[in-house]
Image (cartoon, rainbow, N blue to C red):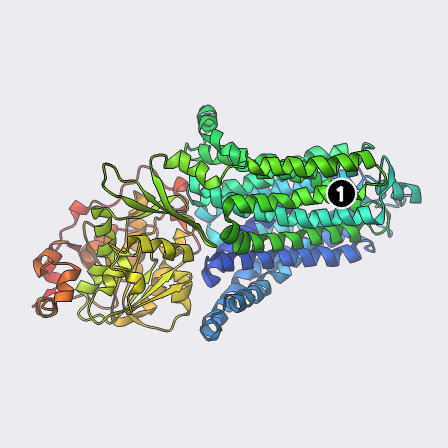
């Protein structure tokens, strides 16, 4: 093998990892715009992504050993990845059009809808992800040649590829989406893939591989070397031991993805659900895996009893995982210690707690997972003829385990067992694999096997008994003085109802993933009820209303009070519905009202697929900084709202943006609703398809109904006094600037926004009520 080949492969494989994570981030975002952001939809998309990788790895593994020029093949695959990924936005547009037509006629069954989403997303991703999955066996075929140290090279290349994935996640999460948008990010990643391919194709000239040989006639390993690569200090592995190794990494795939789901859910309660938090948490997981593999790779050239080492590591993984969130108790002091260092490196102070908490909770376990991977692959795959095929089988089955883990973690474990139970059950997979490996060595090393079979389960049970309840850890940190009334860890989110009252005065608060969402205090209740009552009062005769988001139910309850109206409420999380029942005293018992229909679904996805038209569309408060909020403040979202309105319908949108974000949201709303009027000190934007008129006579006539007076006892003049401005003033006041698009959700990436920019001055507006008031 030429000396330059391995460094070249390492460099190319690093950038291949960069592109893979950029694509994954972009695909998840783009497909969420079609299928929604429910856990069912997101897990389905992730499963289809990993299914493509598994398929590619399995197929490539079968043919890689027969390739005469695997480096040339790798180059062509990378070019194929780039071109096919570049085409996915076009394919996505076609899938979206088909989904809008087909989905309303599909049965509402979760199973059926999940299957349909999987089929559609798999159709989008199958070509690029299958090609991406094929790269590992082909690269390994290029790199291994006649070297029997399979684990060392595989571990090194796997670590390098994962390091590229870390870079890709950070680049996508901190720069690409915010600065250049999704479409151009695809173009950048595709260009990198094509360059990788061209370099690989050019480098392959003059290099020839023969079956089971390396380039330029590197000799195949001898039978004794092949046997040694499947061996440990007690001789070659038996077939049973190798099967146990393989099953260990099927379970490891399940473990890693299920753990991510539990970790992310609980860490978000401390760190807030922002795009930056999810980016750093993902990078922390990948960092542990990359470092672990990098440490293990050179050690695999030494002769050790690697099966025994793997047995111990799997037990350590179980113990580290089950105790992982205990470390969060030290997050505060650790953050205070590293804060000055983070500032000296130019990091925003917001990022310090995220980095510290992610490292404390996840790095120990992921380091061990990364350390175990090349050991297991070396024990299973060996060297010599058939190695690429065995690598393909190993990697594809590991991915199949990951698919199962992603589905089980969100759909089964958290809703049924809760976070602590899920953590213990997931960690038990590693303990089970350690026990399985120990028992497989009973004949070779009975003393070691017996020791691990006894001590391992005892150690795991003791650790499980001492595992912290993750929710208790977050409550101790953020809500020490509050009493928990109710908590549910649902499929979509964790909902908690607390009582923060003092001196005998109750104060119920709803938290969604640790974020304050609703309260029964007077001012907060007024804000939420106004979002529902205001458009009902301003519309001349509303009959059909849509409320996006339930929360504490005050908004939907206020709308439902209007006489003769029917209300559809679309709420993302079923757990929120249970929490809303604690606020019946402020939401008018909205959950039991006969004129209210509740649908647990993604609100944007409902607007995309519904054929129903509404007189009123309003939404609960959604903070612009939250991950995913960009899709609910974009021009495309407001277009969906407009399309679902009747000709005389009204759309109310809360605007609580800070600094530059306020102007972005206002300009975006104006771009879809040019007849926008502004109310309530600029926090409420009212959109309509035609110029808005508020009739004094119509309002007085409707106000004779006692039910309407009970909704909000405001006279005509009181409402008019909240008017802040109309279209002519708003167009000049908002000025030119950014209009939010699905392709570039900059409001989620608040660290990239100018910190000194102020929102337009509301006092500069000269409201002219005469423009809208009619007799």
Element type at mark 1: helix
- Position of residue 282 in the picture relative to residue 624 (left or right): right
Residue 555, by quadrant, is bottom left
Query: Percent x, y for residue 727?
Result: 20, 59
Q: Which residue does the image show at 76% across and 46% down from the upper left?
A: 245
In the picture, the quarter occupied by the C terminus is bottom left
Q: Quadrant of residue 47?
A: bottom right
Residue 8: tell me if it is visible: no
Image point (72%, 40%), residue name? 155
Q: Nearer the viewer, residue 621 or 64?
A: 621
Q: Position of residue 702 (x, y in %)?
A: 12, 69
Query: 632 or 196: which is nearer to us?
Result: 632
On the rendered structure, is 295 left or right of 256?
Answer: right
User: Quick one: which residue is furthest to the bottom in this view?
Assistant: 105
Residue for badge 1? 437
> Percent from the top left, x then y, of residue 288?
61, 37
Q: Is residue 390 left or right of residue 290?
A: right
């Amino acid at each position: 093998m030429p000396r330059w080949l391995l460094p070249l492969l390492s460099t190319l494989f690093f950038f291949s990892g960069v592109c893979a994570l950029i694509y994954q981030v972009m695909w998840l975002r783009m497909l969420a715009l079609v299928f929604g952001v429910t856990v069912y939809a997101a897990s389905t998309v992730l499963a289809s992504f990993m299914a493509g990788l598994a398929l590619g790895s399995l197929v490539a593994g079968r043919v890689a050993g027969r390739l005469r020029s695997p480096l040339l093949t790798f180059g062509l695959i990378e070019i194929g990845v780039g071109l096919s990924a570049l085409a996915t936005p076009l394919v996505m547009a076609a899938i979206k059009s088909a989904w809008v037509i087909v989905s309303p006629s599909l049965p509402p069954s979760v199973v059926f809808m999940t299957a349909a989403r999987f089929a559609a997303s798999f159709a989008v991703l199958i070509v690029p992800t299958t090609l991406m999955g094929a790269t590992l066996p082909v690269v390994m075929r290029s790199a291994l040649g006649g070297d029997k140290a399979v684990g060392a090279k595989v571990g090194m290349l796997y670590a390098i590829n994962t390091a590229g994935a870390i870079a890709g996640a950070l680049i996508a999460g901190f720069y690409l989406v915010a600065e250049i948008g999704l479409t151009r990010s695809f173009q950048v990643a595709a260009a990198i893939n094509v360059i990788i391919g061209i370099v690989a194709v050019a480098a392959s000239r003059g290099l020839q591989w023969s079956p089971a040989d390396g380039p330029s006639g590197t000799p195949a390993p001898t039978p004794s070397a092949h046997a040694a690569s499947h061996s440990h200090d007690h001789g070659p592995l038996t077939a049973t031991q190798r099967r146990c190794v393989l099953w260990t990494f099927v379970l490891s795939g399940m473990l890693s993805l299920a753990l991510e789901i539990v970790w992310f859910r609980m860490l978000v309660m401390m760190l807030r659900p922002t795009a930056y938090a999810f980016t750093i948490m993902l990078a922390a997981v990948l960092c542990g895996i990359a470092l672990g593999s990098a440490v293990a790779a050179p050690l695999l050239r030494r002769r050790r009893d690697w099966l025994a080492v793997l047995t111990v590591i799997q037990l350590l993984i179980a113990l580290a995982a089950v105790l992982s969130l205990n470390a969060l108790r030290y997050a505060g002091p650790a953050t205070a210690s590293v804060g000055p260092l983070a500032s000296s490196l130019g990091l925003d102070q917001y990022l310090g707690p995220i980095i510290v908490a992610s490292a404390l909770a996840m790095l120990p376990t992921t380091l061990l997972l990364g350390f175990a991977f090349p050991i297991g692959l070396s024990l299973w795959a060996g060297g010599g003829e058939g190695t690429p095929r065995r690598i393909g089988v190993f990697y594809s089955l590991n991915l199949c385990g990951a698919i199962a883990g992603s589905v089980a973690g969100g759909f089964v474990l958290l809703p049924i067992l809760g976070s602590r139970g899920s953590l213990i059950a997931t960690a038990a997979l590693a303990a089970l694999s350690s026990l399985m490996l120990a028992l497989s060595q009973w004949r070779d090393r009975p003393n070691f096997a017996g020791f691990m079979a006894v001590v391992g389960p005892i150690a795991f049970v003791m650790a499980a008994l001492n595992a912290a309840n993750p929710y208790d850890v977050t409550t101790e940190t953020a809500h020490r003085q509050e009493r928990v009334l109710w908590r549910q860890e649902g499929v979509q989110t964790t909902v908690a109802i607390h009582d923060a009252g003092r001196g005998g005065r109750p104060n119920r608060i709803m938290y969604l993933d640790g974020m304050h969402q609703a309260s029964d205090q007077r001012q907060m209740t007024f804000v939420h009820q106004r979002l529902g009552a205001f458009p009902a009062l301003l519309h001349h005769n509303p009959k059909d209303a849509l409320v996006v988001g339930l929360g504490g139910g005050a908004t939907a309850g206020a709308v439902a009070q209007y006489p003769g109206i029917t209300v559809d409420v679309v709420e993302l999380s079923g757990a929120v519905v249970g929490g809303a029942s604690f606020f019946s005293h402020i939401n008018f018992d909205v959950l039991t009202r006969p004129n209210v229909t509740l649908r647990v679904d993604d609100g944007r996805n409902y607007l995309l697929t519904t054929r129903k038209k509404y007189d009123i569309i309003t939404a609960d408060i959604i903070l612009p900084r939250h991950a995913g909020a960009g899709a609910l403040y974009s021009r495309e979202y407001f277009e969906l709202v407009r399309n679902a309105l009747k000709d005389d319908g009204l759309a109310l949108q809360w605007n609580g943006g800070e600094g530059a974000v306020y102007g972005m949201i206002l300009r975006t709303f104006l771009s879809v609703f040019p007849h926008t009027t502004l109310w309530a000190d600029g926090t409420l934007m009212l959109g309509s398809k035609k110029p808005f008129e508020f009739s004094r006579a119509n309002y007085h006539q409707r106000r004779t109904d006692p039910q309407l007076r009970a909704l909000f006892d405001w006279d005509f003049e009181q409402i008019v006094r909240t008017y802040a401005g109309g279209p002519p003033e708003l167009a000049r006041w908002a000025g030119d600037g950014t209009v939010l698009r699905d392709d570039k959700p900059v409001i989620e990436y608040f660290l990239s926004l100018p910190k000194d920019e102020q929102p337009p001055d509301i006092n500069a507006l000269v409201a002219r009520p005469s423009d809208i008031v009619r007799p």
